[in-house]
Image (tube, rainbow, N blue to C red):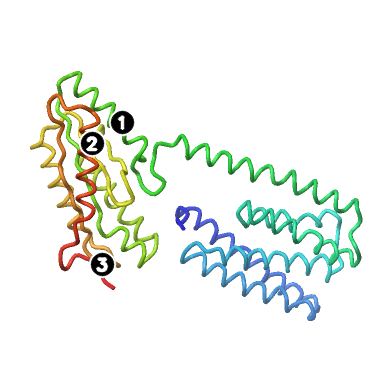
Amino acid sequence: MIEPPQWVRSWRVCADVMGTLLLASLALWHYLLGQYESILLPASLSCLMAVIAVFDTRRASRVSNYLLLLCGCLALYDQTVLQASFDAFWISVPITLILLVLPFGPALVLALAVMPIWLMVVGQSSPSLDQIKFLLTFLAVTSLAGWEYLRQRDLNRATDPSDVDCDAINRATLHERLNGEFERAQHLDQRLAVVILHLPQLEIASEQYGSRTQLTQLDQLCQAVRLHCRDHDILGRESHDTFWLVLPNTTESGAMLVIKRLEQALSEVRLSDIGPLTLRSRLCALNAKEPWQHFEQRLARRSEALAVTPLPPGRSCPP
């Protein structure tokens, strides 16, 4: 599972802390009013919210989402049923909370399953037909927002040229841009060089240490390319751990200088989990009058050969 951006996690932790403080304040309010029988539930929920906040500071987890949903439903049950402050409007709050906290698919299934149970708990009897119609209508209307979000997300993924994990273009855009640079080089009689970059520790580190170490390696590679390459050079992700760096109007000697700068920059990177960052590279320059299919196949063969080369001793990921 890919972790959300840092700002999303920060806002989530802030919301957890605010929920913890609100529940603790509610428990304190019951204590000041002398309602000692009502202190236990909000105090327990405040402790649960503190645990959720600790989980969210470490990494994204579905467990914290379900715990947050459980905490919200228990707090709502306490204020509506146990405190006898029920209003017809609050009958739809659990559905809204489920749709906000969980992914759209599981949220829709869980909302349909919880809806009759919540009606029986609140009403202390079998739900009426009008209540069922109201909740089904409310669920259908609120689900439109989740469906629209999924549609927009899929549309952005289909049209976004960037890779989902790093600051590089995806494979389809890479081949399209490379084809354009190939045609321009052939038409203007210019040089074209492609540097194949391979991170052999990427897959191993992802399996042993999680996605955070993987994203750190990708970020270090993209940052080195931004600092040591030109603005019109193109970095694209060919496969999971292989990248193509397209260098328009660049000779082989110029491409070799780029490789040395990148290798020197990444050799100074030390990650806490895997140690020194290993980078493999190979140059593939365009030959005169070479057809596009032959050039693309040559790039693919060299990428595969570079990926199957074993790591040198002492540069593998530690157990």
Contact check, label 1 and label 2, Cβ < 8 Å: yes
Pick the front one: 132 or 230:
132
Q: State the residue lying farthest toward the bottom.
A: 36
Which residue: 21% across, 32% down? 294
Q: How far is the residue under mark 1 from the one under mark 2?
A: 9 Å
Assign a secondary structure to mark 2.
strand
* Amino acid marked by disc 2: Val
Q: How far is the residue under mark 2 from the one under mark 3?
A: 29 Å
Provide the residue designation for mark 1. 177
Please give left or right for residue 99 compared with residue 210 in the image: right
Q: State the residue lying farthest toward the top.
A: 187
Residue 80, image x, y percentages: 82, 65
Please give left or right for residue 249 compared with residue 108 in the image: left
Pick the front one: 100 or 244:
244
Provide the residue designation for mark 3. 317
* Amino acid marked by disc 3: Cys
Residue 61, image x, y percentages: 52, 64
